[in-house]
Image: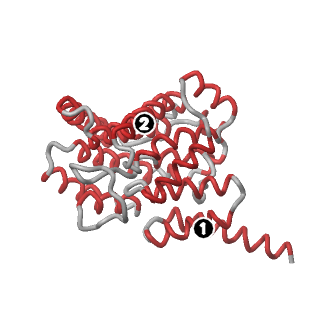
Amino acid sequence: MGALDFRGWGTIALIAICIEALAARVAVAGPLDSSNPLDAGYRQMYDLQFDAARKSFGLWQRSHPDDPFADTSLAAADLFSEFNRLHVFEVEMFVNDAQFMTRDKFDANPAILARFERELGDSERLAAARLKRNPRDSNALLAQVLNQGLEGDDRAMIEARGIAALSNLKRSARLGEQLLSYDPECFDAYLAVGFENYLLGSSPFFVRWVVWLYGGETDFAAGLKDLQLTADRGHYLAPYARMLLAVAALRANDNARAIALLDGLAREFPHNHLYRDELTKLREEKEKTAIQLN
């Protein structure tokens, strides 16, 4: 397998690596706090330390048995550990949108996927119970936003059902809009709304046409604006938003900005080789260009 190429559809797989930790409040700003089990778990997932992340999420689940984020978090750890094992993030075909849409399925572990689906179901039941008591429960709504993203990731990356994943993308964005109507300072939720615009607005015409039929949005500039808001003021989703902004910079041939963003991520998450691999490739390209100009 080659190094990860951030320029294509492969970035859809990372939509789930960020959620809220506090049971009473979602809009938490500032860096991840490793003394908090959920914060620690998401920091570990960004750093590709999935076993450690599952332990942290399990600790949170035992102390917060009615919190849907515990099961959502465990599901995320399961899915992305499979992505990492299968080198999903490293497949260079993601640079080609059409090839991504027509590729074969990955051979994932059935037991892990079964556990993933069970955890998503448990999260949805807990979220529904909390929303029945309080329809404006921010934590429950954000859990549902993330659950849709995770299901879409599974469909797009494991099952190779890219078009079917668009319905999850749409539902995630609409739930994000609903959450923001109740809590406009939940800055992490802006990414769920902006991601639809960002990803689909940068896709080929036939994809945008299908999304239009689904009722989705494809305003790329609006998507970038929401991503920047999450990058600047979000909590769990801030690192992911910075990565997506690096993707946008690469697509715009702004390698200097992409290098700056990826360098920051690599420093913050030193065990994540994906950032380092892309940085190495970009810096090599920069050196070759400089030599050719001289």
Residue 213: which quarter of the image?
top right
Residue 114: which quarter of the image?
top left
Q: Is residue 189 left or right of residue 250?
A: left
Image position, residue 88 (x, y; %): 50, 49
Q: Is residue 221 left or right of residue 162?
A: right
Give the position of the N terminus as an image quadrant.
bottom right
What number of labels is visible? 2
In the rendered image, which residue does mark 1 sit on?
279
Give the position of the C terminus as an image quadrant.
bottom right
Mark 1 closeness class: few <14, some 14–19, many ≥20 residues within 10 Å:
many
Local secondary structure at mark 2: helix
* Amino acid type of the residue tagged 1 in the rendering: Leu
Q: Of all residues shown, which one is farthest toward the top? A: 213
In the rendered view, would you say 25 is above or below 181? below
In the rendered image, which residue does mark 2 sit on?
177
User: What is the spatial separation of the Cα atoms under label 2 and label 1, in whole angstroms?
Assistant: 34 Å
* Amino acid type of the residue tagged 2 in the rendering: Glu
